[in-house]
Amino acid sequence: MMDHVDMRIVEELSKNSRITMKELGERVHLTGQAATSRVAKLEDQGIIKRYTVDLDLEKLGYVVQAFINIWTNDLSHQPYLSFIRTQTEYVIRNYKISGDSCYLLECRFPSNKTMDRFLVDLNKHVNYKLSIVIS
Amino acid sequence: MMDHVDMRIVEELSKNSRITMKELGERVHLTGQAATSRVAKLEDQGIIKRYTVDLDLEKLGYVVQAFINIWTNDLSHQPYLSFIRTQTEYVIRNYKISGDSCYLLECRFPSNKTMDRFLVDLNKHVNYKLSIVIS
DNA sequence: GTTGAAAGACACCATCC
DNA sequence: GGATGGTGTCTTTCAAC
């Protein structure tokens, strides 16, 4: 499926996904057209899911970043899962994990005040342990 | 600094960073030139850090994804920090966090065997608690 | 921030190896 | 699978408003 050239392509696109296909081709010693068709295949296979940007969350006004471990004794996790689906502004990702806790929730908040409000609401559904990201 | 149009631009580029400036302009009701200059400003301000891709790690052969909480009693964290800098293939991100543990390490591995080797080496520098990502 | 026009670069197509 | 050549589109850089 993936050969070394595909690996190099994925690597280069991770570094800068807005380069032209011609430029990408040169970096992996291919013509632009060959690069284009390989990238199209990677997209079709779902290996490349989407093209996106790395943003500076602090500069965007999200001053607080946090990881929140989630515990719940309920057999159904639906109340929790429904709740976080309503909080897309603050929730970056929600991982189901093995180990002590049930989920690991990655969040960002514009202030401690909004985080506090979020945690109060979260606490209606589950127990949690908060870890603030320092760097 | 950031107005609503800039917010919309960042939003659209998050969804697809490979659209043309003309297309981006249309989506936020601007001309291509105006979109280009706004994006250039966002890049200069460091709000847009880089253009990248979302990859399917499983399809790339990284079958195991894990979060690892790190504890250390050493005053200097340098041995640990030096170690993870040598493990760029497996380490996605390393967060310094508040709370119980010192760091939260996000990793991916092509197999349980490679993860085990990593953990054995990691254990020479710090104590850890492993959480495997299920979904 | 918009419009318009120029040159250059790129993407996409079919065709070929 | 990859390379070549032609056409239409986009980008870039001016200008003036």
Image: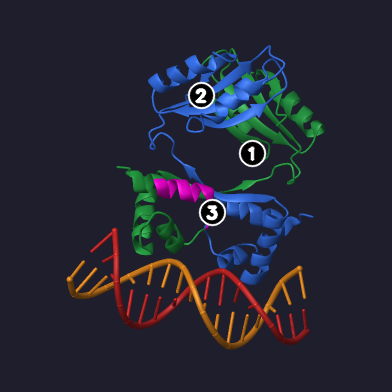
Chain colours: A blue, B green, C red, D orange
Q: Residue at x 70, y 57 (%)?
A: A44
Label drawn at residue B88: 1
Q: State the separation of the CA atoms marked 2 and 1.
A: 23 Å
If you read the primary sequence from the N terminus, does the residue marked by circle 2 or circle 3 appear first? 3
Per the rendering, the mark at residue A66 is 2
Q: Is residue B102 above or below residue B132?
A: above
Residue bounds of the magenta highlight: B8-18
Q: Residue at x 69, y 45 (%)?
A: B56
Q: Dot 1: what SS?
A: loop
Q: Label 1 sits on what residue type?
A: Thr
Q: Amino acid at mark 2?
A: Ala
- Quarter-wise, where is residue B76 in the image? top right
Give the x, y percent position of residue A19. 53, 60
Q: Which residue is mark 3?
A: A16
Q: Residue B123 occupies which quadrant of the picture?
A: top right
Q: Is residue A119 above or below residue A50?
A: above
Q: Secondary structure at mark 3?
A: loop
Q: Are marks 2 and 3 on the same chain?
A: yes
Q: Quadrant of the N terminus of chain A?
A: bottom right
Other residues around mark 2 within 10 Å, as few (<14) / some (14–19) / many (≥20): many
User: Do discs 3 and 1 belong to a common subunit?
Assistant: no
Which chain is home to disc 1? B
Residue A18: mark in rendering: none
Left or right for B121, reference A52: right
- Residue at disc 2, secondary structure: strand
Tags 2 and 1 on a common chain? no
Q: Position of residue B21 (x, y in %)?
A: 43, 61
Name the chain under label 3: A
Measured Cα–Cα span from mark 3 to mark 1: 18 Å
